[in-house]
Image (tube, coloured by chain):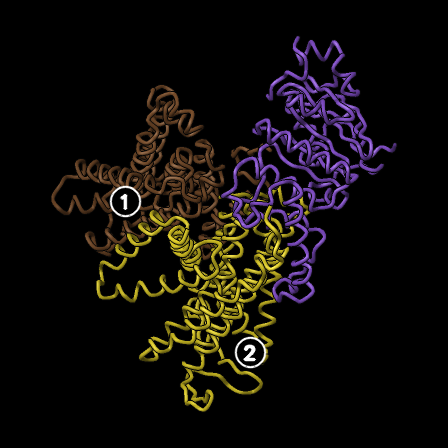
Amino acid sequence: MFSEFFQFSFSGITLGAIYALVALGFTLIYNASHVINFAQGEFLMIGGMGTVVLMDAGAPIYLAIPGAIVMAGIAGVLLHKLAIAPAKNADVVTLIIITIGASIFLRGLAQIFWGKDYHVLPAFSDTESLSVGGAVLLTQSLWILGIAALLVTALGLFFTRTALGKALLATSMNKDAASLVGIKTGAILTLAFGIAALLGAVAGVIVAPITFTAYDIGIMLGLKGFIAAAIGGLGSSTGAILGGLLLGLAEAYTAGYISSDYKDAVPFVLILAILFFLPNGLLGSRAVERV
Amino acid sequence: MSTLLSVKNLSKEFGGVHAVEDLSFEVEKGRIHSIIGPNGAGKTTLFNLITGLYQPSAGSVHLNGRSLADHKPHELAPLGMCRTFQNLQICMNMNALENVMLGRHRHLGQGTLASLLKLPALRRADRDCRQQCAELMAFVGCGQYLNHHASAMPYGALKRLEIARALASEPDILLLDEPAAGLNRTETDALREVIRKIADKGITVVLVEHDMKLVMSISDQVLVLCYGRQLADGSPDQIRANPDVIDAYLGSRKPEEEATA
Amino acid sequence: MATVNARTFDTQSKAPGLIGLFVVLALAPLLAANAFHYDLMIKICLTAMVAVGLNLLVGYAGQVSLGHAAFYAGGAYASALLTQNYQLAPLPAMLLAAVGVGAMAWLVGRPILHLKGHYLSMATLGLGVIAAIVINNEDQITGGPDGLAVAPLSVFGHELSVFGSYEWFGVAITGTQLWYLIAAGGLFLAVWLALNLIDSPLGRALRALHGSEIAAQVAGVDTAKYKLRVFVISAVYASVAGSLYAHYSGFITPDAASFGHSIELITIVVLGGMASTYGVILGAAILMLIPQFLTGFQELEMVLFGAILMAVMIFMPRGLVPTIARRFQKEAA
């Protein structure tokens, strides 16, 4: 019984790490520009599918992966420059529809150039699984957790130790003030989108060996990442990570102990439950309206 | 002379910062009562406490003898209290007249079915409402914007629109939060006339202001706040001569020469 | 000082728009060459009906709902089940369904409408998806992924089915054409009611929710209660449209409650123009017609659709109709 719990917990944390990365990407963009990026999931798709396509074209895996990640980064930059920046001060709902349009657009491109088939990436290690305490653990999970932890640390260092990172934080706190002290907020926003895309792409690559990858995997993953970010409190990076892990575990336990039919309902039940008690998410800040 | 609004030992704390501390004063019916004080003295916080937007940490507010504790902001209009805002709260998605008509909300029919079907009684009431509100707009001096959209109106006109909206509710007491902010001398003089006309109608006015000329020329009573505490409470002449007030706020110049903040 | 004309902004200003709508709806059949065209027009009318209600919530009152398809499906399934399992006549069933869906909206709306901004969208999204999943899984009641068959609409014993033949002022019309009359009539009624609502004290209070909640409160509006009210009203609109669709198509599947459908509805409202009742009708028409024009492009359909959506929202952020109207206003001035 304990081994069962251990198994579910492990797969839950693995899934949670992926959701956390997607949620981080969301939070990054939301913080910098107050845009809810419904195309976030597509960056995962580009990471996974891009790698597959490059490998099919003959590239070795250690070149295909960076190549795909760069592709996603470019997509993120273009998304900001061509779709978000021109919209300037549009309504929140309008911006949401723009990102929805972008996600449909990217999915359409993937469908045309990369096809509709499902693909599988090879796992990173040769040993596919280990037996620990009676539970079967995929070595890929260890890769996922390791890489995710690395990324989160790197991101943290970026924000606290580098001038560029601090500029990004400043822009997210007060765009006008930041530009008044000489920060090029337009470039910063583009950077935020780029980094969010890279995060998403890496997540897409490291999870591809476990799940399938196809042109439309972005929809559900993006949505769940958004929910994870909201659970943690939109705007809080720590919250995004917490939310992601919580979501992953909740899904794994539900699928394991309750019913796998309703597994897909878990994120939505969870967000409703959290919002009921904590209207601003776990770590979200309560904004006071000044009169 | 009866008390309309009574504030007793009112305090509000924001995590250690005492925005308002142990404030007590009374506003008499039919008078114009001004509240002055430097920026950060707690004037708008006081207004927000009185109008239910903030809950006090201690103390009480009574309107006509009835405690306003635990009253939600929307429950005060039916009790006869209305206010305007320092940073305008105008609905920019409606036209000028509709903004004023919003003020009359509690006097009009609000049933869902009646509204969907636009029953004749509702239609008639709305037509009368339009007439009344147009007259109010003229009363406060922005009648020329009758056919304008709120988003197309200048700042000064919007300030008056908000006063018209507050009057539309037929209040017993009107709280004006820095109505002269951003207005030039001419506009401020016109504002003084409007406030006088409002008081002449028997409506009690409580005014938060920085413009000393306006305050001193129109008030029956002046309350001076400093760092959330009461510094002085008396007639304009008394306040003018009060050495504490002069020290803390007015400086060495005479009040009439004080420019708008 | 301008003199007051009691007729300023009087309700008579609604007439031109309504007449225009009537003319468009009346003339549309001239463009229809076959049953497929009529089918498209019926679907546009019913979708527009939902959009008009959703617009009251999103465009006028400024509250976002990303789960509205759930109410549409609720009306559809309720009508289907009540007529099939309880032998209730379609019209009373539709009414009962609307009451039921309205009650559900009231129940779920109470806690979530206290949420602000994106959290509200999330909560509505969550509710919508949960509803879809439940409909999908509880196949004993709902027929699961395979859906349910629905009895045709019948009014006072007369069956109004797409397969029948009918007479309209002496002219012989098909069942599908009759259904167009029903759908168009329903849309017209829906618009008329909505316009009445917007121009009433209740409507002003709703618009104030979007403009300035604080101003509304100070005027005595219980903002929480009113948000709930408009939420319920928009849910009832969706329910009626859903019921009608169920009877029209004779079949209902869980797709009706899907997240994708909810997104479609929001897109229509934003595309056509928030706070523009006629705009959302145009939005519905465009959203349903674009795929028809793109079928020729096959693979490019998704790409083009996404590109068009982005382009329109970037260059006309207020939506099609308000932007065009503003352009005409500027030229006239």
For residue B239, which quarter of the picture?
A: top right
Which chain is rendered brown in the image? A
The answer to whether one can see residue A130 in this image is no
Which chain is rendered purple in the image? B
Give the residue at mark 2.
C90
Query: Looking at the image, do the residues carrying marks 1 and 2 touch, with CB atoms under 8 Å apart?
Result: no
Residue positioned most to the left: A58
Give the residue at mark 1.
A209
The answer to whether one can see residue B127 in this image is yes
Image location of residue A214, percent across then percent down: 27, 51
Which chain is rendered yellow in the image? C
- Residue at 34% x, 20% y is A163
Image location of residue A110, percent across then percent down: 24, 51
Residues B224 and A272: in front is B224
Residues B4 and C234: in front is B4
Residues C194 and B13: in front is C194
Q: Is residue C310 left or right of residue A261?
A: left
Local secondary structure at mark 2 = helix
